[in-house]
Each structure stands twice: as structure tokens, then as C-alpha cells.
Amino acid sequence: MDPVNQIRRVCVITSNRADWSKLRPVVLSLLEEAVVEVSVIATGSHLLQEFGQTVNEIKIDFPAVVEVSTIVAGDARSAMVDSVGFGLVKISNTLLHLKPEVCVIHGDRFDALSATIAANLLDITVAHIEGGELSGTVDGDLRHAITKLAHIHFACSEDAAFRIRAMGENPDNIFLTGCPSYKRLFSINDESWQSSGVESIFPTLERKGYVVALMHPCVAVEQQSLRDYECFIHALFTVKKQTVFLYPNVDPGNKRIFKYYTSIRSNTVTGPSGCSCIHISHQIYSQC
């Protein structure tokens, strides 16, 4: 077969709602390529009911998504460590079955680290999106570790590309592409509010004068993170505006945040009006 027209097997691995918002445009573009055979692996919080089972959103665009459970239950950092090991075993077995030539991985999450180690050790080319960014805490360390294990780098900014080069990566393998989700964000206009379905999800929400509230636990300082969240909630109650509360991610400490938010909402009648939501799609989130 002509090497130019040879089918290339590309596997996109996603672990949470945030990285799917970046990887979805990549998958849709790859599906348009006749010489690319695409597979998608959903791991991490995508498969958890308590986080909205967001794998169902992936199925809208890619019904053949492969579901791989990787999260070990628990609210301590040790559960995150266990999930990395468990994910490494599960993802490597899946990759051996799919036999991709390239794995596309995004970001800085511990789930992405498992996928990257598995692909690298199986001699599969790793293409990393959003390397070189500064995310802080343990996520920043994981992002740079993923960069060193990856082979192709799609940077979102000049500064990020500079950091990737500074880590010793081959400049010929670093591409300044911007963030894949920019296109959707730039398409937002005055008509987007109605067309996105925001009103159907939040029928009592007024178009102006509301707050979207979201705070994730900080793995490095779990107790301080909870205290910060308490201050965050009390500040919102002081403002007394309509508020959409979004649940945090799967990081250690999230269950304590759930518990605190639930208790204060049930015991307080003077707080802001609004609602809480486990998950909303990136399309609706971007309109809010």
C-alpha cells in the first residue's frame, strides 16, 4: 500500500469532562480523515454515576467508545495513587487489544499519566495536547512528566512551547496549535443562549446577574482546601445572587466538599437562590 494512503490507527484517551471538551474537536476532525482509523477510550470519572456518567456525552459523537474503569474508590490521596496503578494495568490491556500507532492524550491529570506510561512502555507514539502549561500543585508535576513521556507535542501558547523545548524535547516535534476548544468559544454570540439549551436546563435562571460557582479541591493541601471552600460558599451566600453550583472533580477531598455544600444548603434559608448540578455539557457551560 502507498505509505501516503496507509491507514493509521489513532487512539484518543479521555478521562474527564474537562479534557473531553478539548479532545472532542480532535476526534471529530480525525473522523473526517479517510486514512485514519479512530478509537476512543473513556476512563476515570467519565464512568462514574456520581460525576454525571459523562461517557454518555461521548457516545453521542462516538458510539463505539471503549469504557475502561480506572478509579479506585476513596477520598484520600492514596486512592489517587491506587487509581494510577489500576489504570496503568487496565489501559495497557486495552491498548494491546486496539493496537494503535498513536495515542492522543490531554493535560495533566493522574488518569492521563497512567495512559501515557502504558502507551510509552508499549512503544506507542504519544501525542500530548497542552503540555508546557503551568497548572500548579501536583497537576503541574504530572503535566511535565507526561511531556517527557510523550513524543509529539501540541502546545497552546508560545510560553508553553518554550517550556517544552527547555525540557529537552525535539523542536521538530513541537507544534504551536492553540487550544482545540477555542473554535467553540469564539463562536459564542447573543443567539447562543437560546440555541445551547441553557434555558431548558435552568428555566428559572435570569440571563444577567447570576453566578456560576465551581471550586475543585487542592490535592496538596486538602484541609486548607476545605476551609477555602467554606469561605467561598459563605461569600456567595453574602452576595445573595442566583447561583449555579457545579460539583467539583474527582480529586481527593471532593466528598468532603460535597458533604459541606449539602449540609449548608439544607440548613440555610438565607442563601442565594439557584440550583446545584453534578455536570453540564461544555456547550452549555461555555454559554453560562
Image: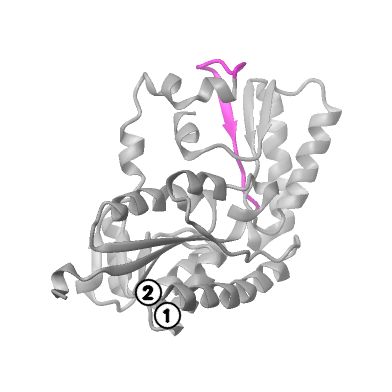
Q: Position of residue 207 (x, y in %)?
A: 50, 17
Query: In this picture, which residue range is highlighted in magenta?
Result: 203-217
Q: Quadrant of the N terminus?
A: bottom left
Judge whether residue 285 is colored magenta: no
State the SS at label 1. Answer: helix
Amino acid type at circle 2 is Ala
Q: Is residue 188 left or right of residue 119?
A: left
Per the image, the residue denoted by label 1 is 120
Query: In this view, which residue lies farthest toward the right?
Result: 267
Q: Quadrant of residue 176?
A: bottom left
Label 2 crowding class (10 Å Cα cut-off): few <14, some 14-19, many 20+? many
Q: Quadrant of residue 214?
A: top right
Distance from Cα at disc 1 to Cα at disc 2: 7 Å
Q: Is residue 229 visible?
A: yes
Q: Position of residue 14 (x, y in %)?
A: 49, 58
Q: Residue at x 63, y 20 (%)?
A: 241
Instruction: Please give the count of numbered marks on the rendered protein.
Output: 2
State the SS at label 2. Answer: loop
Judge whether residue 215 is colored magenta: yes
Amino acid type at circle 1 is Asn
* Residue placed most toward the observer, 93 or 71: 93
Per the image, the residue denoted by label 2 is 150
Relative to 141, residue 224 above or below = above
**Foreground disc of the pair 1, 2:** 1
Q: How is the image coloured?
A: one colour
The rendered magenta stretch, by its main secondary structure, is classed as loop
Q: Is residue 268 left or right of residue 193?
A: right
Q: Does the residue at mark 1 contact the one at mark 2 (Cβ under 8 Å)?
A: yes
Relative to 74, residue 209 above or below = above
Q: Residue at x 64, y 74 (%)?
A: 86
